[in-house]
């Protein structure tokens, strides 16, 4: 849903010229990759029962150390990418608000 909203408001984003090209690509691909990593992490946790990384997705089960670590890295890196991309997108929208 967030990616669909980003697509709708993308034409309104005005980023500074010196950061424009890099930030445009980072926001676009960073948000997509971040959300895909989170989705894959949740899916792997629910299939394998990785309950230490995501307690609700793997409720009542436990997975191997490698699986737990993989899920934790995927979800955390996806969250960080999404956070950075959303922050840059919000700063890009400040130009039309002010």
Image (tube, rainbow, N blue to C red):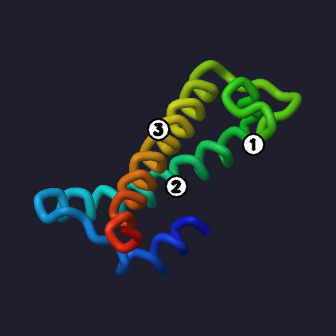
* Image spot of residue 23 (x, y percent): 25, 58
Q: Secondary structure at mark 1?
A: helix
Left or right for 14, reference 32: left
Q: Residue at x 56, y 65 (%)?
A: 2
Left or right for 12, reference 57: left
Contact between marks 2 and 1 (CB within 8 A): the answer is no
**C-alpha separation, residue under disc 2 versus residue under disc 1:** 15 Å
Residue 46 sits in quarter: top right
Q: Secondary structure at mark 3?
A: helix
Quick check: 5 above or below 64? below
Q: Which mark is residue 36?
A: 2
* Image spot of residue 55 (x, y percent): 78, 31
Which residue matches tag 3? 77
Tag in front: 2 or 1: 2
Q: Residue furthest front?
A: 98
**Label located before the other in sequence (1 or 3):** 1
Contact between marks 1 and 3 (CB within 8 A): the answer is no
Quick check: 64 above or below 23? above
**Label located before the other in sequence (2 or 1):** 2
Q: Residue at x 83, y 28 (%)?
A: 61
Q: Residue at x 61, y 69 (%)?
A: 1
* Image spot of residue 16 (x, y percent): 19, 62
């Amino acid at each position: 849903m967030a990616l669909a909203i980003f697509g709708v408001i993308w034409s309104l984003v005005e980023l500074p010229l010196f950061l424009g090209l890099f930030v445009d690509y980072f926001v676009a691909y960073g948000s997509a990759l971040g959300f895909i990593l989170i989705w894959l992490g949740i899916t792997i946790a629910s299939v394998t029962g990785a309950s230490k990384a995501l307690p609700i997705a793997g409720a009542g089960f436990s997975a191997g150390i490698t699986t737990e670590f993989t899920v934790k890295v995927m979800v955390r890196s996806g969250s960080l990418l999404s956070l950075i991309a959303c922050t840059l997108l919000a700063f890009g929208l400040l130009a039309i608000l002010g």
